[in-house]
Image (cartoon, rainbow, N blue to C red):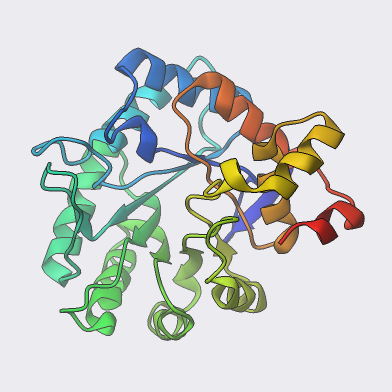
Amino acid sequence: MRYRSIGDIEVSAIGLGGMPLSIEGRPDHDRAVATIHAALDAGVTLIDTADSYHWHAGETGHNEALIADALATYGGGTDAVLVATKGGRGRPGDGSWTVTGTPSHLKNACEGSLKRLGVDAIGLYQLHKPDENVPWAESVGAIKELADEGKIRLAGVSNVSSAQILEAREILGEKLVSVQNEHSPAHLAHEPELALCTELGLAYLPWGPLGGIAGAATFHAVAEELGISPQQVCLAWLLAKSPSVVAIPGSTRPATIRDSAAAADLVLSAEDLARLP
């Protein structure tokens, strides 16, 4: 397993995105826990979650509680595992997503995450999405207050533009260590934000990293030649884009996260990379 940095913390280059374990179509509890345990067995030391990763109304924090349970029941050590959660979005239970970036909401959300995760301070707390009805500086300012109070150790922002990254950096300073945007074969719009993160030394966590892989013929061709899965090729391609990238593929089965984790050790040739987007 190769490692990369998020702030002053070293994490596996491939993490686990927890969302599919708690939203629509989620596996049962035992399989979900087995999937998290399989990730840990494979050397994964970053698990990404959010208080809004749930299915039904009234289930806020389902994924956080699941991860806390999986870590508590794991047979090996978990001290090196960084759990990164997020606040600022909600799910009414009808499949839709809401955005609430008021300082009061973010502070209350953080308190709930602290309790569910069973920690005194959250390792990495991320502002889930800008709220168009709340000035960005106010939302980010609330994250700074949480950091100043010692409730979060490191901060991140998600679903943001380059301008929002720079403004967040002005407010948070060195506490800002990561950016999480959608990035995949099907979604390359955030290449400028990736370049900015690389320049600033911020970790870049592409969410939905396997998006579009089913129809990406070149990835399948490279995978067939190498005798591996297209998913591994896709994740290795993302890692090759920048040393800032830490990929967080989702999974609902032990076999798929083991396959994804193996991509951390895959180094694609210059020739293969030239064939990919």
Q: Position of residue 251 (x, y in %)?
A: 48, 32
User: Which residue is found at the position 46% from the left and 70% from the top?
Assistant: 176
Q: In which quarter of the image is residue 27?
A: top left
* Front-most of residues 134 and 145: 134
Mark yes or no: residue 166 visible: yes
Q: Quadrant of residue 153?
A: bottom left
- Residue 121 lies, with reference to residue 136, above or below; the image says above
Q: In which quarter of the image is residue 164?
A: bottom left
- 137 to the left or right of 197: left
- 229 to the left or right of 270: left
- Residue 193 lies, with reference to residue 207, above or below; the image says below
User: Which residue is found at the position 44% from the left and 86% from the top?
Assistant: 163
User: Which residue is found at the position 40% from the left and 38% from the top?
Assistant: 18
* Front-most of residues 117 and 127: 127
User: Which residue is found at the position 25% from the left and 46% from the top?
Assistant: 51
- 21 to the left or right of 36: left
Q: Classify the position of the C terminus by image quarter.
A: bottom right
Q: Where is residue 70 in the image (x, y as percent from the top left)?
A: 39, 23
Q: Classify the position of the N terminus by image quarter.
A: top right
* Front-most of residues 240 and 50: 240
Q: Where is residue 201 in the image (x, y as percent from the top left)?
A: 63, 72
Q: Position of residue 9 (x, y in %)?
A: 58, 53
Mark yes or no: residue 40 visible: no
